[in-house]
Amino acid sequence: YYKKESGRMHKHLLTQLGTKLRLLLAGDIHHYSRYSAKIAQEGPELIISGGGGAFLHPTHLNVDVAGYTRAATFPSPAISRALAIRNPFQFRRRNWAFEILLGTFMVLMVLPALPLCGDAEAAFEAWSTAGLLPTWAGLVWKCYVRILEETTLALAAQVGMALVMASFPEAQWGQDRRLFWGIPLGMSISLCTVGVACGLELALMALGADGHQGKRGAQAELPAILRNLPAPWTDIGVWALRSLLSFFDLPMHIYNSRAAVCAAGAEAPRSLVVLYEVLMLPYFWVLATPIATFILGTYLALSSLCGRHVDEAFSSLRIENFKNFLRLHIDSDGSLHIYAIGIGHVGRQWKEDPMWRREEDSGRAPAQRSAPSRWMPVDAVEPMLVDYIHLPVHRTEKKTLA
């Protein structure tokens, strides 16, 4: 059978067992769901109970099984959809390591093209007449032109990001849909990267406007309480405050280093360019990476609602709740009772169960103790019955048993 199409062995077993097979149980998907035959006793109950997995899988996707209808899920499809749309807002907080990787790649996509000497100054002069949005859009276009014509590393990073994002959508979508979803995703992250960098360049131009520099750093106006201190504390306080303001005025340092790089032109020493890029990096990172992770989280949320990227979308959420397990009981007549137990909120803080310590030396097996586990959650965990199935013995089976 291993050389033939998938599912032939499974179909063969179903044919051989016939009505004797009453239940198919799997646990490879991390939720609880049950599918029942549309016509009673025309097929076994199909149960997925993988609630002990590392993360939760969605239940809002109704798998089409021929001859079956979905009878129960845990959590409910409505809760599953609500969890899916959390991705844009929680992706960054729960995946900080991925943010570092993505942010590093974004730095390589634009920082080698900075500073935009001449282009940023011209855009700032046109700001008052053309408006902010057209001015910013024009500067973004000039930045892309500079990346294409004057840089190697930034161009390679841009192309690499476009290829990765275009191939990121699942192959099951088909090539057309993969491009339909992947190309806008790559373009959005690229535009976020270049757009933030151009916005910072315009902000630096505004910082260097006439009369604005005199209100910053060592030239900032001092508080009245500092000027009214008794001598010599007035002079010491003024000197200390102006020194601190001058040292920590990072925007002014960025502006001065940028001005030095632009003044030197192509002859600018590498140390001066690196200084500018290092000073610019914190502002770029703080602004660009949250937007990029929001874009990626939005993509995962939308694709999971469409039935794709369910592993990536829900593993990124790292949901620990909604665990489940089964309790099975077989009566003396051979009928089967299945109890699906769900736990909506799991314990995250634990303490030692005092009953366990009392019975530690009792010699009884853990299953025979009133406290079989040493640890118990600090906050009470409330299990619930999420589903119940009773599978009676078929009449033919009863005759065989008799």
Image (cartoon, rainbow, N blue to C red):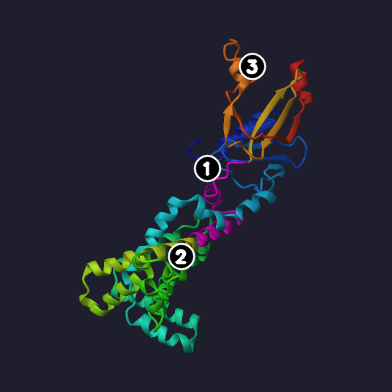
**Who is closer to the viewer here, 241 or 173?**
241
**Who is closer to the viewer here, 308 or 87?**
87
The percent coordinates of residue 353 (x first, y second) are 61, 24
Name which quarter of the figure residue 396 lies in. top right
Amino acid type of the residue that numbered disc 3 sits on in the rendered structure: Arg
Give the number of the disc on residue 5: 1
Q: Is residue 311 magenta?
A: yes
The percent coordinates of residue 80 (x first, y second) are 65, 49
Q: Which residues are magenta?
A: 293-321
For mark 3, does the 10 Å Cα neighbourhood hold few (<14), some (14 to 19), or many (20 or more) residues? Answer: some
**Who is closer to the viewer here, 318 or 334?**
318
Q: Is tag 2's residue or tag 1's residue first in the polypeptide sequence? A: 1
From the viewer's perspective, is residue 212 above or below residue 34?
below
Is residue 157 something one can see in this rendering?
Answer: no
Residue named by callout 3: 369
Q: Nearer the viewer, mark 3 or mark 1?
A: 3
Residue named by callout 2: 287
Q: Is residue 182 magenta?
A: no
Amino acid type of the residue that numbered disc 1 sits on in the rendered structure: Glu
Q: Is tag 3's residue or tag 1's residue first in the polypeptide sequence? A: 1
Side of 159 where 30 appears, left or right: right
For mark 2, does the 10 Å Cα neighbourhood hold few (<14), some (14 to 19), or many (20 or more) residues? Answer: some
- Circles 2 and 1 in contact, beta carbons < 8 Å: no
Extreme front residue here? Answer: 230
Residue under the image location 30 percent in, 66 percent down: 153
Cα distance in 3D space between marks 2 and 3: 57 Å
